[in-house]
Amino acid sequence: MASESPKKNWSINDFEIGKPLGKGKFGRVYLARESKSKYIVALKVIFKEQIEKYRLQHQLKREMAIQTSLRHPHVLRLYGWFHDAERIFLILEYAHGGELYGELRRVGYLSEQQAATYIASLTHALAYCHEKHVIHRDIKPENLLLDHEGRLKIADFGWSVQSKNKRHTMCGTLDYLAPEMVENKAHDYAVDNWTLGVLCYEFLYGVPPFEADSQADTFQRIMKVDLTFPSTPHVSTEAKDLIIQLLVKDSAKRLPLDKILKHPWIIMNADPNGSFPE
Ligand SMILES: Cc1cc(NC(=O)CCC(=O)c2ccc(F)c(C(F)(F)F)c2)ccc1-c1nn(C(C)C)c2ncnc(N)c12
């Protein structure tokens, strides 16, 4: 019986490299197949000189430790990694459905059922990450992928931190930043709750709530929580209620993750198969 424990010392010779999937941070990512098991993966190549140039060695090591330790149906798996003289290779779960962003751009906005299913999946995944003291802090449509059944996977933890206490570093694009991050103040898990509100709005309206022509204007709108709902028939009052309870400036007053899963809009609209139970 072959040993069930994952092989530790992978090398490039264990894989057949397929088509390029795109350019990720610090390198390219390829479709690949592990030769013995024929298992399909995404193989990300990161150039060591890039990591050295930005002095990211320690952060990358910490990321790899965080990501290999996370096991959740809605968190994209990092199965392992290996390196050669000039490159680091990440062996990642392959998300056949590609970027959720692409689907959102293609259809314009999502149905309430689809949006609620994705929000429920994200909430389950964030509850799992938070209980492991991980704040993602960079959840945006580009970091959300879909598997072959259209189920959501949070990916690219390029900026998450193992949080024992509050953090101060800036990251991510502006649209999804919570006020306390915009002000570069100490922040904690509740930043992810704010981002859920931003994403819920964007899923339903096709644009993020604080979008503006300039960064300065976006900052202003976030700081004022300048939230307006276009009058469209396809968004229910319950959906707006959830968004309003998440886009709250005082991070302590944002709807907690467990209450999101009990919110009427989620109960009425989320597809239980699309998002895994506790
Ligand atoms: C390309 C890709 C990457 C990832 N994850 C990561 O790369 C983690 C990288 C990381 O944590 C990291 C890297 C450098 C660095 F310096 C640091 C530091 F130090 F700053 F912390 C952190 C997940 C999924 C994909 C992906 N992309 N795509 C296409 C949409 C292109 C896919 N299509 C199908 N399936 C897929 N899996 C994908």
Image: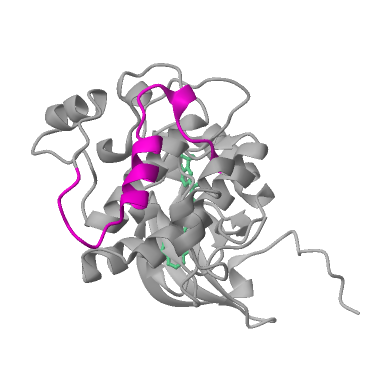
Residue 276 in the magenta stretch? The answer is no
Side of 232 relative to 101 (left or right): left
Report the front residue among 66 and 101. Answer: 101
Q: Position of residue 122 (x, y in %)?
A: 50, 52
Q: How was the colour assigned to the protein in this rendering?
A: one colour
Q: Residue furthest left?
A: 213
Whether residue 86 is visible, yes or no, is no
Q: Position of residue 64 (x, y in %)?
A: 60, 46
Whether residue 277 is visible, yes or no, is yes
Residue 125 vs 38, above or below: the answer is above
Residue 71 quadrant: bottom right
Residue 237 in the magenta stretch? The answer is yes
Q: Residue furthest right?
A: 1
Q: Position of residue 160 (x, y in %)?
A: 50, 38
Report the front residue among 269 and 49. Answer: 269
Q: Position of residue 206 (x, y in %)?
A: 22, 57
Residue 53 quadrant: top left
Report the front residue among 30 and 222. Answer: 222
Side of 141 relative to 218 (left or right): right
Looking at the image, which residue is at 21% across and 27% down? 219
Looking at the image, which residue is at 20% across and 45% down? 229
Q: How many marks?
A: 0
Range shown magenta: 229-257
Image quarter where ligand 1 lies: bottom left
Looking at the figure, which quarter contains the C terminus? bottom right
Residue 111 quadrant: bottom left
Looking at the figure, which quarter contains the N terminus? bottom right
Residue 74 vs 140, above or below: the answer is below
